[in-house]
Image: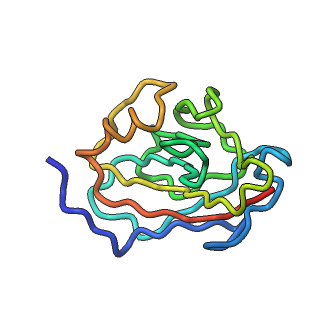
Amino acid sequence: MAQKLNVADLKVSSIAFAEGAPIPERYTGDGADTSPPLEWTGVPDGTAAFVVISHDPDAPLVDGFTHWVLYGIPSGVSSLSEGTDGFVAGRNSFGNTGYNGPAPPPGHGVHHYYFWVYALDRDLDLEPGLDRRTVLERIEDHVIEQNRLIGTYEH
């Protein structure tokens, strides 16, 4: 059984962009398409592993659009470097494993990109290539705390 969620302490940030600010082109499909650096602080006691998911709920699809699913991140890790390819990569909505950055439809307005960090009470040793929905289903009972950084992008 999962512990009670604590939503006060875990904080997610990036040196590449501030909360609510535009994501630099370098980290998008228009640029180098490399993952941005992320870091988190205020990790709750009992954390054994992390999951990172980047999702665009503004995409004109029923379930939005997933840009990145990364898991198997040990509890001692508190940041991801730019372009990280370590840990276990899941499948994004492009059908690729790893990161593919923002690429909203032209003229669709500003999209919001959520970079979620989930602190888990144990390492679930999930197999590579899982999609966002599957990962969320598998971690649901093990999330101690979660938080996100939101960036924006538009064409």
Please name whichever residue, 110 or 84, is drawn nearer the observer in this view of the structure: 110
Q: In which quarter of the view is residue 146 placed? A: bottom left
Can you say whether 134 is above or below 38 in the image? above
Q: Nearer the viewer, residue 82 or 61?
A: 61
| x and y, in percent, of residue 99 in the image | 66, 40
- Give the color scheme: rainbow, by chain, secondary structure or one colour: rainbow
Q: Residue 22: horizontal and vertical position, in percent?
A: 73, 67
For the residue pair 29 and 65, the one nearer the viewer reads as 65
Which quarter of the picture shows residue 74?
top left
Q: Position of residue 19 (x, y in %)?
A: 61, 73
Most distant residue in the right direction: 31
- Residue 86 lies, with reference to residue 128, above or below; the image says below
Residue 113: x %, y % from top left:
61, 57
Q: Residue furthest left?
A: 1
Q: Residue at x 64, y 27 (%)?
A: 96
Q: Residue sitting at 19 percent across and 62 percent down?
A: 4
Residue visible at 49% across and 63% down?
A: 148
**Rendered position, 5 above or below 32:** below
Q: Quadrant where the C terminus lies?
A: bottom right
Q: Is residue 1 left or right of residue 50?
A: left
User: How many numbered discs?
Assistant: 0
Position of 75 compared to 17: left or right?
left
